[in-house]
Amino acid sequence: MVVMLGAIVTVAYAATPKLGSIFMGSSAHKHYALSIQAKCSGNCKKATRVGIQVTAGNPKHRGGKCPYGVYQLNSAPIKDGKFSAKGRFTAKGKLGFEVSGTFTSVTKVRGRISGPKACGGSEGYSLKAGGAGTAPGGY
């Protein structure tokens, strides 16, 4: 006989966003602006991929170590409610960004963005569909 006293079991489920949903907002320390769009490949009824844009740098200092720009990352598949996308760019040297995340509901996504130290390094984010969001201190 097994007796469990005071045990709490927590299970986190990943979700799939609605096709066409757009999640926009800033990273935790506002070094990056993110736009994540739920897409699909082919003729489908649910989201199977994400398209991601990262805005980095300061428009007032376009010649700085982190050139201001909007960077389109490679689209990434959604698997079990999770995704990870990378992009490399030639702008005043080479810049690389990686965005990973988990859809915690059909309207919320949490994750992490990593970029060059000059652009802000690595930060968490938390976004809602159709609106601005920001991470509460990281992920």
Image: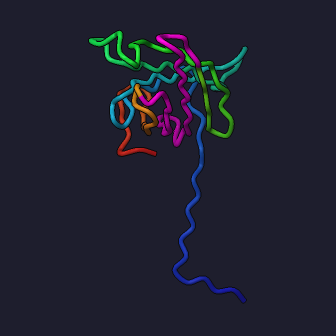
Judged from this view, the residue extending furthest toward the left is 60
Q: Position of residue 131 (x, y in %)?
A: 37, 27
Colour setting: rainbow
In the rendered structure, the answer to whether residue 126 lies left or right of residue 99 reads left
Q: Give residue 15's quadrant in the image.
A: top right
Q: Which residues are magenta?
A: 88-117
Chief SS of the magenta region: strand
Look at the image and say whether residue 86 sits in the magenta stretch: no
- At x 44% / y 24%, what residue is drawn? 34
Q: Give residue 74's quadrant in the image.
A: top right
Q: Position of residue 90 (x, y in %)?
A: 54, 11
Instruction: Identify whether 57 is placed above or below 85.
Output: above
Q: Quadrant of the N terminus?
A: bottom right
Q: Which one is nearer the viewer's eye here, 90 or 111?
A: 90
Q: Give residue 18's quadrant in the image.
A: top right
Q: Position of residue 76 (x, y in %)?
A: 64, 25
Instruction: Count every numbered label the image shows and give the total.
Output: 0
- At x 66% / y 22%, what residue is drawn? 45
Look at the image and say whether residue 110 sits in the magenta stretch: yes
Q: Position of residue 10 (x, y in %)?
A: 55, 62
Q: Which one is nearer the viewer's eye here, 115 or 15?
A: 115
- At x 49% / y 37%, what residue is drawn? 112
